[in-house]
Image (cartoon, rainbow, N blue to C red):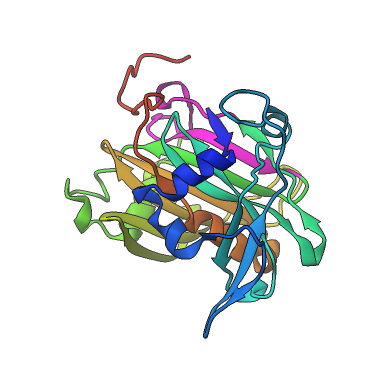
Amino acid sequence: METVLSPSHSRAISNHPKLSLFRDQAKISSSNQKICNSNKKFVACCCESSEPTSQNGFCRRDIVLFGFAASVATVFPVEGSVADEEIKMAPIVDDLNAYSYLIPLEMPSKNFSFKWVESRKPERYSSAAPLSPNARLRIVAERVDFFDNLILSVTIGPPNPIFLKSNDKSTWEAKDVADSVLSDKSALRVTSSQRMAESSVLDAHTSEIDGEPYWYYEYLVRKSPTKTVTDSSIFRHYVAASVERDGFLYTLNASTLNKQWDMMGPVLEKTVASFRLLPPTENYVPPYKDPWRFW
């Protein structure tokens, strides 16, 4: 179940060893004020609290309507074209698949609010919708802003041995991880090379976080982004992060139209940079468990 953190959950997660980057890049601030040091500008991010409707503190109303709410204030560096922009964000946790990330809520100075809808509720890998006929890569959760043409999706799938031949993930290159994921990302009955021809990787790099490699990559998909638009010059611009666990790649994809990238790109990059695997709880269902189960 994907939930928004209550204050108690936020404190627990902020102290978690798997979220050290949140501690390094996103310190908790109750003052919600800008903080500056010698060479970086930090902005406070928060969203208004909601009254919990259950003992675990989750805010049902916000989860159902928008899928986000939090009563925490997060401080993190903002770079690029939105360097002077305050961005309100909230943490999202999926304990079924054991991961978390920050979702953008508002850009106050632009009087802009994101309008997220939970288009796919979190589900186990065995019952998730496949992204290709071979059903290797599956989408386990998705949020969409239909008004602004933004998509956040989490996929899980095994590494493609064509690109990742070694079982030692420390030897994997980010570009090869990107090719592995993209080769299985198509609903059409086409070959892996044809699927890759639809996409173009612009950048790829690896970062080690708490001893685990995270692979980050930026890519374009050269297909009509909507049913009503056929202009081949219009495409989707993606940024993604992948990490391996239990023999499967967990990937957060964030995308928008290419014409919106200058405004939305830096925000989506911050969301992807916040993606972390969490230590499994009793609710965690590993991808290899009950592969026959579809509910």
Residue 29 is situated, as x and y percent measured from the top left of the image, at: 59, 60
Lateral position of residue 113 relative to residue 251, left or right:
right
Say above or below: 35 vs 65: below
Residue 86 is situated, as x and y percent measured from the top left of the image, at: 69, 66
Lateral position of residue 42 relative to residue 286, left or right:
right
Residue sitting nearer the eye, 137 or 44:
44
Q: Quadrant of residue 209?
A: bottom left
Residue sitting nearer the eye, 248 or 193:
248
- What residue is shown at x 65% (from left), y 71% (from top)? 34
Residue 171 is situated, as x and y percent measured from the top left of the image, at: 20, 57
Whether residue 48 appears in this view of the structure is yes
- What residue is shown at x 24% (from left), y 49% (from top)? 164
Say above or below: 34 vs 26: below
Lateral position of residue 157 relative to residue 142, left or right:
left
Lateral position of residue 249 relative to residue 77, left or right:
left
Residue 226 is situated, as x and y percent measured from the top left of the image, at: 70, 46
Count of residue discs: 0
Q: Quadrant of residue 205?
A: bottom left
Whether residue 257 appears in this view of the structure is no
Which residue is the extreme one toward the right? 111
Membership of 77 in magenta stretch: no
Say above or below: 134 vs 224: above
Q: Which residues are magenta?
A: 121-146
Q: Quadrant of residue 63?
A: top right
Residue sitting nearer the eye, 241 or 99:
99
Which residue is the extreme one toward the bottom? 38
